[in-house]
Image (cartoon, rainbow, N blue to C red):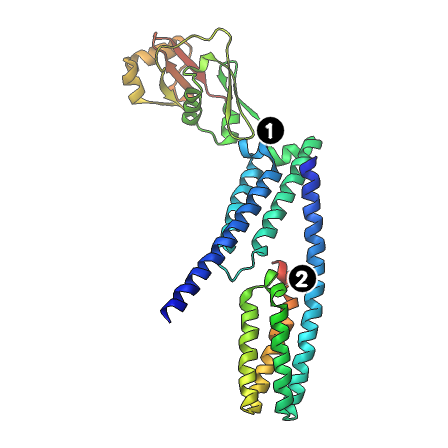
């Protein structure tokens, strides 16, 4: 009976933890997406200084949330986000509009795919 | 430069050490939750869990790109499932039958139950070797033999079991003569046929098992029709 209670508590804890983590992940990615949209807008209007500043803020945000994101997500996905961010910053500093926007779009896709992989969907289960 | 590289290597190895220790602890705790019964005698479902746990734990141990939780959570899930399943089996007979199966009697009052052997895909040689392993060389000495749900063979010997000096020669198994065993027994095929005739057996193919003991006694079991 003791082990059953422990097992059920673990099960419950896993479910609660999973729900809490998914919610947190969604709010973090929303924050990232917002920041990325600001960068995209600035790049469209060729305001490179502003885009560069926002990119640095996004880098700081990713670094801040990395521990939580790494705890469950594949480390490779976050490495890809950081790599693209780094490349985008370099293009922004060079005032290379086309490449910066291209990297921004890739980033948008990578950030959006983070919570998508954690949702209870048939394609994720299979 | 070289010192930086070697320092990084050491740190990388330390990460693996920490991850391994965390996984080791979580697997040990999980197995403790599973209980002592499972460690001593593995039922089919418990064997599956044990194999899966070992595999699940080893993947994030080697690859630091995989989060530790993706190894720990499935292990915990398996343990939860296993504990819940064993509790259900404990409470409901039908669940016990599905999860662990039921024991099968393969020898009853010195007679091998052929159909049961066939159902279990247990061949005669396996049965005889299990009997020998349990210190019972002659089928005639066995009152009952049961294949337990764990796959072990339990033997209940007859109260007046003869103490055999040597191992009986299994001269016929599954309707065919075992030449080596016949030579070991010291008898000829002619003698065997004659003895079978005396016992009312027309063809060797009809015999499921025949053995000759050290004192020359012939034990026969006819195939079930």
**Residue identifier under label 2:** A121
- Residue at mark 1: chain: B
Quadrant of residue B138 within the rendered picture = top left
- Residue at mark 2: chain: A
In the image, taking residue A124 as reference, residue B7 lies left or right, namely left
In front: A117, or B184? A117
Which secondary structure, mark 1? loop
Which secondary structure, mark 2? loop
Where B115 sits versus B193, above or below? below
Q: Which mark is residue B28?
A: none
Q: Residues within 10 Å of mark 1 (few under 14, many from 20)?
A: few
Residue B78 percent across, percent down from the top left = 61, 46
Q: Which mark is residue B102?
A: 1
Q: Residues within 10 Å of mark 2 (few under 14, many from 20)?
A: few
Question: Where, quadrant-wise, is the N terminus of chain B in this rendering?
Answer: bottom left
Residue furthest to the front in view is B3
Residue B92 visible in the current orientation: no
Residue A52 percent across, percent down from the top left = 61, 86
In the image, taking residue A62 as reference, residue B165 lies left or right, namely left
Residue A26 percent across, percent down from the top left = 70, 68
Quadrant of residue A79 within the rendered picture = bottom right
Q: How many marks?
A: 2
Q: CA distance from mark 1 to mark 2?
A: 38 Å
Q: Residue at x 39, y 64 (%)?
A: B6
Q: Residue at x 49, y 29 (%)?
A: B118
Residue B34 visible in the current orientation: yes
């Amino acid at each position: 009976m003791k082990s059953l209670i422990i097992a059920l508590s673990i099960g419950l804890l896993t479910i609660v933890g999973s729900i809490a983590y998914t919610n947190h992940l969604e709010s973090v990615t929303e924050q990232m997406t917002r920041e990325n949209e600001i960068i995209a807008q600035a790049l469209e209007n060729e305001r490179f200084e502003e885009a560069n500043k926002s990119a640095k803020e996004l880098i700081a945000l990713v670094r801040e949330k990395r521990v939580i994101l790494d705890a469950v997500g594949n480390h490779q996905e976050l490495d890809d986000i950081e790599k693209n961010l780094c490349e985008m910053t370099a293009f922004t500093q060079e005032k290379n509009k086309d490449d910066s926007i291209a990297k921004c779009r890739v980033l948008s896709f990578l950030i959006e795919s983070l919570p998508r992989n954690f949702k209870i969907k048939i394609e994720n289960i299979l | 430069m070289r010192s930086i590289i070697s320092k990084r290597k050491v740190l990388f190895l330390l990460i693996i050490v920490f991850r391994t220790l965390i996984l080791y602890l979580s697997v040990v705790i999980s197995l403790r939750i599973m209980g002592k019964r499972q460690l001593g005698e593995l039922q089919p479902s418990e064997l599956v869990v044990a194999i899966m746990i070992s595999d699940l734990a080893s993947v994030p141990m080697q690859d630091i790109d995989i989060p530790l939780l993706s190894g720990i959570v499935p292990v915990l899930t398996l343990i939860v499932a296993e504990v819940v399943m064993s509790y259900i089996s404990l409470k409901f007979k039908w669940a016990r039958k599905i999860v662990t199966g039921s024991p099968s009697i393969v020898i009853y009052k010195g007679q091998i139950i052929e159909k049961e052997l066939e159902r279990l895909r247990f061949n005669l040689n396996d049965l005889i070797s299990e009997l020998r392993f349990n210190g019972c060389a002659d089928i005639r000495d066995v009152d009952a033999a049961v294949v337990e749900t764990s796959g072990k063979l339990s033997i209940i010997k007859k109260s007046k079991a003869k103490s055999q000096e040597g191992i009986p020669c299994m001269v016929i198994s599954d309707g065919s003569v075992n030449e080596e065993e016949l030579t070991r027994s010291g008898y000829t095929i002619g003698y065997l046929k004659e003895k079978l005739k005396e016992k009312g057996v027309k063809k060797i193919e009809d015999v499921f098992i025949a053995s000759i003991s050290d004192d020359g006694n012939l034990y026969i079991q006819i195939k079930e029709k």
